[in-house]
Amino acid sequence: MSATPAVLQATDLHAGYGGPPVLAGVNLTLRSGDAIGLLGRSGVGKSTLVEILGGAMRAHQGHVTLDGVPVGKTPRHRRKEVKARLRTVHQNGIAGVDSQRTVEQTILDAFKEARRAGRTTNNDVEAALAVVGLPIGFVTRRVGTLSGGERQRIAIALALATRPDLLLLDEPLTAVDQSMREEIADDIRALVRADGIGLLVASHDVWLLDRLTDRVLVLAEGRIVESGPLRDLLRDPQHPDTQQLAESLPEAVGGRPPR
């Protein structure tokens, strides 16, 4: 990883799909070592924001930079570097991976790509699988045979194995069996802390945000309307969207957010 803490800076982001704007002036900063949650009701624009932050979608207005280098409009000679330093895991799991490749081949491909971009990796496939609770026997499985939950877990393993500076997760464990989610979340949090990886988790799942993040941003009306530790926000919500969420989760207001 880079010796200098990475900074992902989003400034005045506006985006939409032809109707009312989904994002209408979002400002956000993510640094190495941060653990930030992005909370909001369904359809509020969390996934759109993650897509723009990761460079897969362009904003109508505003810009995103990684240490001053534009994300989404990255100069050709910097694209491998930015891709290796800033990784995104979408809720649909692995995208753009050959379904006939084995899990081992896919992870080794990720290691190789990272090394070409100047990243240091340990090339340990078994360790990469262990972080997401998968046994070494999965190395021979073909990507096309994996279930939705297994694909999500492999996608996280691929992103973490390359030791990025910053990791963006969009509803990363929705298809994972409930019995495994706590262990996987704990392993992810331990690894990002150990490596100083900046983490942004977009989710409606307050249990997951409580487990993975230190601070939460509430997205509503196209912008960040309040922020703070999750339990503080739920105990004293200021915006109507946060108030509605707190009212629907009385257990979270009084103690640990429910599973």
Image (spheres, grey):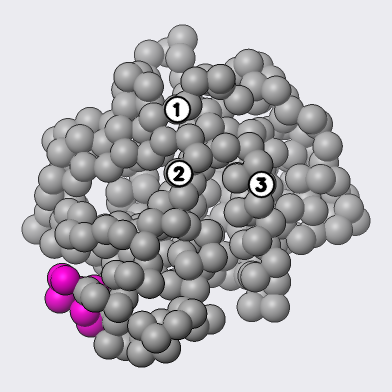
Residue farthest to the top, as pictured: 77
Which numbered disc flags the more N-terminal residue, 2 or 3? 2
Circle 1 residue: 6
Residue 142 at least partly seen? no
Magenta-drawn segment: 238-244
Is the magenta region chiefly helix, strand or loop? Answer: helix
How many angstroms separate mark 2 from mark 1 (CA)? Answer: 10 Å
Q: Count every numbered label the image shows and give the total.
A: 3
Which disc number belongs to residue 191? Answer: 3
Identify residue type, mark 3. Answer: Leu
Based on the displayed image, in which of its 4 quarters is residue 244 positioned? Answer: bottom left
Q: Earlier in the sequence, mark 2 or mark 1?
A: 1
Whether 48 is drawn above or below 158: the answer is: below
Residue at 60% in and 18% down: 117
User: In the rendered structure, which amino acid carries the disc numbered 2?
Assistant: Asp
Amino acid type shown at disc 1: Ala
Q: Residue drawn 57% across and 55% down?
A: 93
Confirm or deny contact between disc 3 and disc 1 (CB under 8 A).
Answer: no
Give the quadrant of the N terminus.
top right
> Of the numbered discs in the image, which one, if any, rests on residue 41?
none
Q: Dot 2 corresponds to which residue?
A: 34
